[in-house]
Image (cartoon, helix red, strand yellow):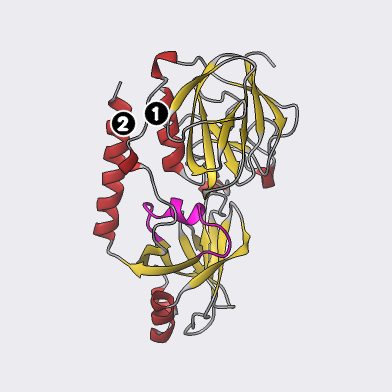
Amino acid sequence: MENAVIKVVKPGLSTSIQDLGRVGYQQFGMVVAGAMDPFALQVGNILVGNPREAAGIEVVIMGPKLKFLQDTVIAICGANLSPKLDGKAISMWHSEIVEKGQELSFGKPIDGSYAYIAVGGGITTDKLMGSRSTYVKAKIGGLTGDYLAEGDRLPAGEPKFDKAGRSLLPHLIPNYTKSKRMRVILGPDQHAFTKAGLHTFLSETYRITTKTDRMGTRLEGKAIEHVAGADIISDAILPGTVQVPASGLPIILLADRQPTGGYTRIATVISEDIPRIAQSFPGKEISFEAVSLTFAQKLYKRRERLLRMLSKIG
């Protein structure tokens, strides 16, 4: 492939190309997809001098082995999956030059599930509906519409070598295991649950099950009581929407969520906390805390200001 910068030696587990998603097409039934942890991808892009929305490589728990075919600049952000360059540990949330012939590999997961490899110039596969994000169920986006495979060669843009050596300040690096409490805005189907059901949702602890993927996180624990059933006329689904089907057990919808859903929506996880949901391993216990829309917007604006400030540095 012309301008190939990376060769996949070993594909790892569900490694894919993702950007910030296929936005603006849900009314046509198209899934947004995109990075499970948008903050980590955006910071990685900023550290290597890319636009925040550039496509990178999403790595899940068991990382790939990648060989670099050209000199470039990379940054790895998100989950700490013990990245190594030619067998030597390298820093997270830090940009550095990678030379032609070097190999990037991953080891033991330490904190989180999804890591992002930002590459100088961004991954430059073809766009579909304004995005390079891979949506495997529809076989679209990325390189072949699927997870990366052995022998794949990935194109990338022109790197900015002067951006090497940049790091995110330690106090800004997310701690994915610090708190089990996830903040939510209640509704829009709050009326569909009994008072006892709402109390259960906000007072009980739930455990993330192994039936968790890019579409959503399924939870187990005490069932949430409905007033008169779980079904509604299909309505809009957002990142972080918490559906409660007839089982009474919540499902938190994530990047590959469907555009609409027919189950009652008890709440929505705020955007600040969605990365912590995505980064959580099966077996982790979480609980929910209701907050106001104003508070959620304040946190969103704070994070956006941070990203914009980082983009202006250097």
**Does 237 appear above or below 100?**
below
What is the distance, in whole Å, between disc 2 and disc 1 at their CAs? 7 Å
Region rendered in magenta: 269-284
- Residue 11 vertical position relative to residue 32 in the rendered view, above or below: above
The residue wearing badge 2 is 310
Residue holding disc 1: 46
Q: What residue is at 51 percent from the left and 62 percent from the top? A: 252
**Is there any visible trace of residue 171 in the rendered image?**
yes
SS state under label 1? helix
Q: Quadrant of the C terminus?
A: top left
Which amino acid type corresponds to the residue marked 2 in the rendered image?
Leu
Q: Is residue 271 magenta?
A: yes
- Measured as percent of width and height from the top left, residue 268 is found at 41, 62
Magenta residues: mostly which secondary structure?
Answer: loop
Q: Visible in this render: residue 32?
A: no
* Crowd rating for badge 1 (residues with CA inside 10 Å; few <14, some 14–19, many 20+): many
Q: Amino acid at mark 1?
A: Ile
In the displayed structure, does residue 160 sit left or right of residue 82? left
**Helix, strand or loop status at disc 2:** helix
Residue reaching furthest to the front? 88
* x and y percentages locating residue 108 in the rendered image: 60, 45
- Identity of the residue drawn at 24% across and 58% down: 294
Tell me if 187 is positioned left or right of 61 in this view: left
Q: Residue at x 47, y 57 (%)?
A: 277
Q: Is residue 153 left or right of residue 264?
A: right
Q: Quadrant of residue 62?
A: top right
Q: Tell me residue 204's x, y (percent).
A: 44, 77
- Would residue 144 be counted in the magenta stretch? no
Mark 2 or 1, nearer chain start: 1
- Point out residue 195 in the picture as x, y percentages from the top left corner: 38, 85
